[in-house]
Amino acid sequence: MNRFNRLTLLMLWLLFIPIMGIAQPQEANSGPSYDALAEVLENEQSRQQLINELRSMAEQQAQPAAETQSAEPVEPSLPSQLAETTSEIAGGLSQQLSNLIAVTSNIFTGNTENVNEQFDRATFLSASLNIALVIAATIALFWLLRRLASPIFIRFSHWSRHGEGKTPVLRLVICVALASLVDVLAVALAYVGGNLVATFLVGESGELTTQASLFLNAFVVIELLKAGLRVLFSSRYDGLRLLPIAASEAAYWNRWMALLIGLVGYGVMVVEPLININISTTLGQGMNTLIMLAAYLYAITVILKNRVRLRQAIRQKAEKSTITAGQFSLILLSRTWHLIALVYFTVILVLTLLSPAEALPYVLFATLKTIAVVVVSILLSSLLAQTLGRRITLSDELRRKLPLLEARLNSYVPPALHFLRILIASIALLLVLNAWYIVDLNAWYESETGGKLMSKIIGVAIILLVAAVVWVLMASVIEHKLNPETGRGRPSARTQTLLLLFRNALAIALGTLTFMIALAEVGINIGPLIAGAGVLGLAIGFGAQKLVQDIITGVFIQIENAMNTGDVVTLGGITGTAEKLSIRSVGIRDLSGTYHIIPFSSVDTVSNYMREFGYHVGEYRVAYRENIDHAIARLQDAFDELAATEDMKHEILDTLEVSGVIALADSSVIIRVRIKSTPGMQWAVGRAYNRLVKMHFEQAGIDIPFPHSTVYFGADKDGHAPAANLRVIEQGAELEQHPSSHAQLGKQTPSKQSTHLSDDAPNEE
């Protein structure tokens, strides 16, 4: 029989007496029996009465529960809670200060109110003297051990700053870790020495008192915290300081924080417990409040005193930062660091006053976790900057085979470094929030949402990494094929063009595929995207027929090897060098340097001057009176001299081809010759050949006709032309003054005079 059935039976048993009074009267002093209960259940009328009674009792129980639920107090608002907390803190402070004054007055007046009954002034003074001896011995031993370890610290610092073989950050981390071990060892030895002094030299021999134990435990905790502080702000050893600040700044902040840790630590862990044990718990609580207030006021004073100086130092760091997000964060921190510090110490004070037993461990561990996260983040960022930030240098053999790989890898370094720094900063922020229990990373990661999100992030990161590796490998293979020093030698122009087009197509395809797979990994349904892309492509195909024609024509031009990068071609009436080929257009640079982009849809004919060989076609004119065979011989002489030059003999592929006389023009006879040359050199060969033809024709006295102008003055019926009316326009004024002398001069030097036709000269044809 389960528990629910037993409870039901018990309820029936408790209700048996009043029901039996209704169904079958019995004697008052007679107890219920199972037989009577069975009779009740067997009787239909009594069974119905029992059911009605149970329902009535259920309704009576439900009404008080509903009233209780409706009467539940409404949760107060945030301002109300804040006002109540503030009032509670103020009242608690006032009460503790009043109790502190009262207990102190009672101690000096001999009143035992709020004072421990076993309190004895002489015993208290003796115990204080004993613990003072333990404190002095422990601190002296610790100071001596630190002095003995000073040469070790100096060596570590020197190797950290001037050592070789490892990166500076790794040397710094190693040396700081070793120095911390030495520091921890010194604390442990001092603790052991203090225990020996407290056990055998102070008080009863062989017994460790509670007071000494309190101090020694506090000594270990506080000195370990100070050792961690020296890791960040080591002032005497520059090579053992993790934070990149000056020694004077490190000494100042180390001294301030060490004093604050000592004040709060020894006050809360030693002074307050000793007062609670020996004098009064009320006095101990008041002393705890005074210690926390003194520490709070001291921290506030130091923060406000260094507000401007630290803001300027952080801003200088921000100006040196190369990351925009990091620079913005540092500038924001420089403006708000004092506010953050004030809020931090205020929260500690409030938590300590409200719940001192739970607040201090919480604040201590959260602060240590925060410092550890920040320090590790800074070290990781510095390590990445010193390892990945340096230029990647490949071997000479690898650079020879893949000359662009080193530059490509170095181009990936800055974005990767920025991404890793942002990732480190984001993880550090989450860990800090988790340390203060603002977010619970463990619970979030164990939840279904957190697990899925982390798996998606990791999946996307793997996809991007694989895509980057595939791109680097494929681009390196293409680069290897394009490199004339590796593979099968210098690739052809067509191979270069096709490989470059393939690399561009690969980049587009790989980028699109990576984007779609990443979206699918995130959880976005890419089916509608693919369908939409298909519909969009169809619409573009109808609306942009020229674009489709460009692409199709470009594909066939590449398949047919009509032209390649570097070829001299004529497209669409433009002649120039093809500098860039894409799947849609070609870029041509003409002779004047103008760059033309010609879509393939406008190309009807491709004229390529760079296929296998070229011809210089020369047409030379000679006068009718010249001997044609003699002129052709001079053309052959010019070709022989051209073929013998060092610059052109390797560019000429065949002998001179003389077509002969191709036309009898109005004033000349035209002779055509052709010179076969390597592709692209026909123009240079032609220029050099024209120069030699001019020189050989001049040496042979062969006249090259050129246009002449003849002045015709007309003629009469007898064929006689009238005299030309000439005037001397040079020295005209002197001619009027001395006509005889200038007429004689004009006869002697006619070539130096310029004449023109008179305006009234006859114009006859």
Image: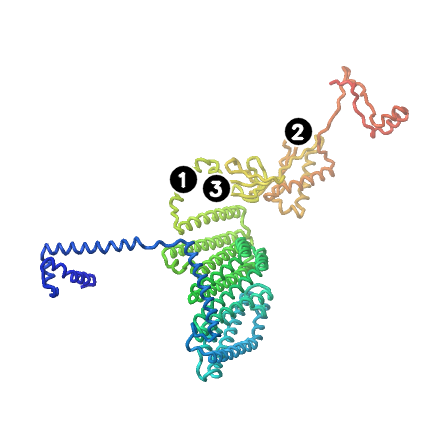
Left or right of residue 733, residue 327 in this image: left
- Distance in Å between CA atoms under marks 3 and 1: 23 Å
Q: Secondary structure at mark 1?
A: helix
The answer to whether residue 367 shows anywhere in this view is yes
The numbered mark, 1 or 2, whose residue comes first in the sequence reads 1
State if disc 3 and disc 2 touch (CB < 8 Å): no
Q: Which residue is mark 2?
A: 665
The answer to whether residue 402 shows anywhere in this view is no
Residue 409, percent from left and from top: 53, 56
Comparing 27 with 259, the one in front is 27
Q: Quadrant of the N terminus?
A: bottom left
Observer-side mark, 3 or 1, equals: 1
Quadrant for residue 693, please give it: top right
Q: Secondary structure at mark 2?
A: loop
Q: Which residue is mark 1?
A: 535
Kind of residue at badge 3: Val
Q: Which residue is mark 3?
A: 555
Using a 10 Å C-alpha cutoff, classify the residue at mark 1 as few (fewer than 14 neighbours), some (14 to 19) or many (20 or more): few
Residue 456, percent from left and from top: 40, 54
Left or right of residue 390, residue 532 in this image: left
Residue 88, percent from left and from top: 43, 61
State if disc 1 and disc 3 touch (CB < 8 Å): no
Comparing 530 with 577, the one in front is 530
Q: Secondary structure at mark 3?
A: helix
Left or right of residue 61, residue 740 in this image: right
Kind of residue at badge 1: Val
The numbered mark, 2 or 3, whose residue comes first in the sequence reads 3
- Distance in Å between CA atoms under marks 2 and 3: 47 Å
- Distance in Å between CA atoms under marks 1 and 2: 66 Å
